[in-house]
Image (cartoon, rainbow, N blue to C red):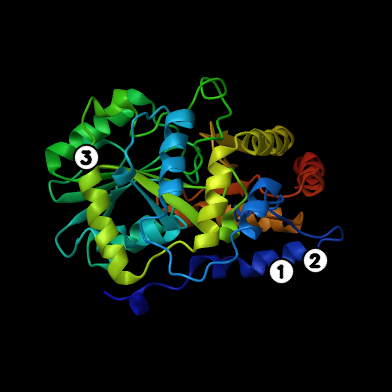
Amino acid sequence: MGVADLADYPWDAVAPYAARARAHPDGIVDLSVGSPVDATPEVVRRALREATDAHAYPQTIGTPALREAIAGWYARRRGVPGLQPEQVLPTVGSKELVALLPLLLGLGPGDVVVHPRAAYPTYEVGARLVGASPVAADDPAAWPDATRLVWLNSPGNPDGRVLDVPSLREAVARARELGAVVAGDECYAELGWDAPWDARPIPSVLDPQVLQGEASGVLSVYSLSKQSNLAGYRAAFLAGDAALVARLTTARKHLGLMVPAPVQSAMIAALRDDTHVAAQKQRYRRRRGILKPALEHAGFRIDGSQAGLYLWATEGRDAWQSLDRLADAGILAGPGHFYGPHFPQHVRLSLTAPDDRVQAAADRLLSFRSSS
């Protein structure tokens, strides 16, 4: 299978609903895509400006300063001490890594790539690209013998599900039984909302309590797009098993996958500064506090959503019908159909809209039930 064989890009199907939402007298409130709307922190922009003399090719593996900053961040923010430079690797955003990891690992026909039942669609795309079989299964006991790559996503996109230490430990143990690589997609880990994740860090797949002294076969994937508003920078990284990192580094060198040198400098600044992350989390907390009760008032039930950037909501009808009703109110959401076949009655709503537009959506939802 090649790129040309992939299905049409699913978000194209949302265009008619977006057009109707834009016709609302007060305009559209676009909550469909989790693209940051807040300013990139000045500490990061300053670092980028000061690094514009980038006349030489960057290294695929990243500068020593960047690798040190990534390792330091894991120790400080994720409870993963002692990572060595050879255990970390910057990537050109996280989506390219998700899509390419089966290829970089040499998977192909006959291999199985496991991903969550409610899943970011690129996990499946990466599997199909190399002719592997994607399997949606949350229960490690259900993972097939042919599994060679397991994607964990905590907090989950779209459902905000969090895997605790025992769940992560069970997943890693099962993957090792199967001889599979575990990749933990942890891009929303700074955004915990409900207890206990409002008061303690969301665990990483690299947590010592999960690994129990052995990092073999395990990778953590992280992006600065959400916590630092760097989606346009394409700034992400992975960490974990040194042998796997070396293997991926070699493949990425051949493919020319290098994070631009100025972006590497910006990443260092972002990783060393926790203040802007706390401020951004408060913005999302405030928006969530406005949007969630308004959705519930309008007849939606919020499932999962203990953490992350989205509210995973259902009103007990097909998602396209919910999209239709929301579009009439000038609100655009994402249908659960995009995240696998298991949640056809859910919609995903993002917290990435300016405060005034989130308030506008809430005001419309508060009158939604009586007029529907």
Tell me the kind of residue under disc 1.
Ala
In whole angstroms, how far apart are the C-alphas of marks 1 and 2?
A: 7 Å
Left or right, 88 with respect to 52, comes to left
The circle on residue 19 is 1
In whole angstroms, how far apart are the C-alphas of marks 2 and 3?
A: 46 Å
> Would you name the residue on which mark 3 appears?
142
Q: What percent of the width, then of the height, locates residue 160?
A: 50, 38
Query: Residue 355 versus residue 75: which sits nearer the camera?
Result: 75
- Position of residue 305 relative to residue 125, above or below, is above
> Would you name the residue on which mark 2 appears?
23
Is the N terminus in the top left, top right, bottom left or bottom right quadrant? bottom left
Quadrant in which residue 21 is drawn:
bottom right
Q: What percent of the width, then of the height, locates residue 279?
A: 69, 35
Callout 2: SS: loop
Q: What percent of the width, then of the height, locates residue 171?
A: 26, 34
Q: Which numbered disc, 2 or 3, marks the residue that appears first in the sequence?
A: 2
Residue visible at 49% across and 64% down in the picture = 260
The crowding category of the residue bearing disc 1, from other C-alpha atoms within 10 Å (few below 14, some 14 to 19, many at least 20), is some
In whole angstroms, how far apart are the C-alphas of marks 1 and 3?
A: 42 Å
Residue visible at 77% across and 65% down in the picture = 22
Toward the right, the furthest residue is: 25
Query: Residue 95 versus residue 277: which sits nearer the camera?
Result: 277
Q: Which numbered disc, 1 or 3, marks the residue that appears first in the sequence?
A: 1
Tell me the kind of residue under disc 2.
Ala
